[in-house]
Amino acid sequence: MKLNCKKCGNEINKLNLNEVQRFEILGMIQQDLKLFAIKKLIDDFGFNHKEAKVIVTHINSKNGKCQRCDYDELENENAECPKCGAFNYNLKEPVFNSDFCTHLEWKLDFENLGIESLKRYWCDGVDTIPYDVKSLSKENIEKNKSIITRAWIGEDGQGVYEMEIKLGEQSVENYKKELSLIDCIPDKEDKDWIKIEPENNRIQVYLK
Ligand SMILES: [Zn+2]
Ligand SMILES: [Zn+2]
């Protein structure tokens, strides 16, 4: 069954994106790389150019917020805006997202590790784009329980580190259910969840 957007009258194609495709396409739209998103939809799904363009204009970049008006309480995916009638794909934010990375950055407390040389270390950011986006597939998370990305760490917060985020039982479950991982970050007081090797610019963090 085909859907129509009540605002522009265009026919809407249903999208069935896996975690990796959602991460990539939503990321492109949020960074205003719409032409790349169109190309990806053509390459990955065989849509023609017009169809892909219509899809991209109906992907709202912020979950809940209509792409055409100021309404910001859209609830489910494939939502029609009750205010202006526009169709919104309203894709859920990927589980590995900037909100999670920011929380992780805040929780990294090196003072608590009890290592004198690391006392003044802090983290200035965790990259929201992992080395390999394919590692974000649910199959991969279940199998390898790991996401590798970059982080900026040091006394000046600027050393480039390879950060491996290890997922525990709770985080794997949350990931499979597409629930946030923020609650899976251990408390600041917990000493055992951070393993850092400054000599190799490497860090591992263990989520619950
Ligand atoms: Zn429309
Ligand atoms: Zn609207």
Image (cartoon, rainbow, N blue to C red):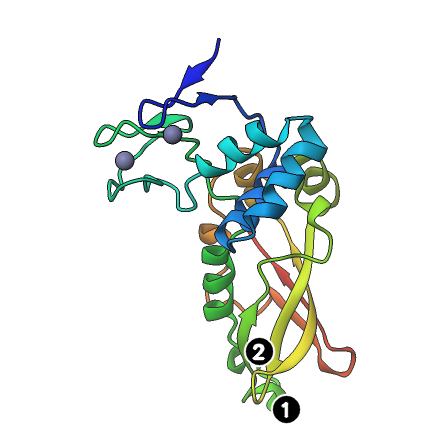
**Position in image of residue 56 (x %, y %):** 51, 37
The reply, left or right, for residue 200 in relation to residue 190 is: right
The reply, left or right, for residue 1 in relation to residue 40 is: left
Q: Quadrant of residue 73?
A: top left
- Give the residue type that dot 1 points to: Ser
Which of these two is toward me, 34 or 129?
34
From mark 2 to mark 1, how far is it between C-alphas? 10 Å
Q: Are marks 2 and 1 in contact (CB under 8 Å)?
A: no
Write down the residue under mark 1. Answer: 117
**Position in image of residue 101 (x %, y %):** 52, 60
The reply, left or right, for residue 199 in relation to residue 147 is: right
Q: Quadrant of residue 71?
A: top left
Residue at the spot x=57%, y=78% of the render?
A: 113
Write down the residue under mark 2. Answer: 113
Disc 1 CB within 8 Å of nearest ligand 2 atom: no
Relative to residue 146, is residue 120 depicted above or below? below
**Position in image of residue 1 (x %, y %):** 48, 8
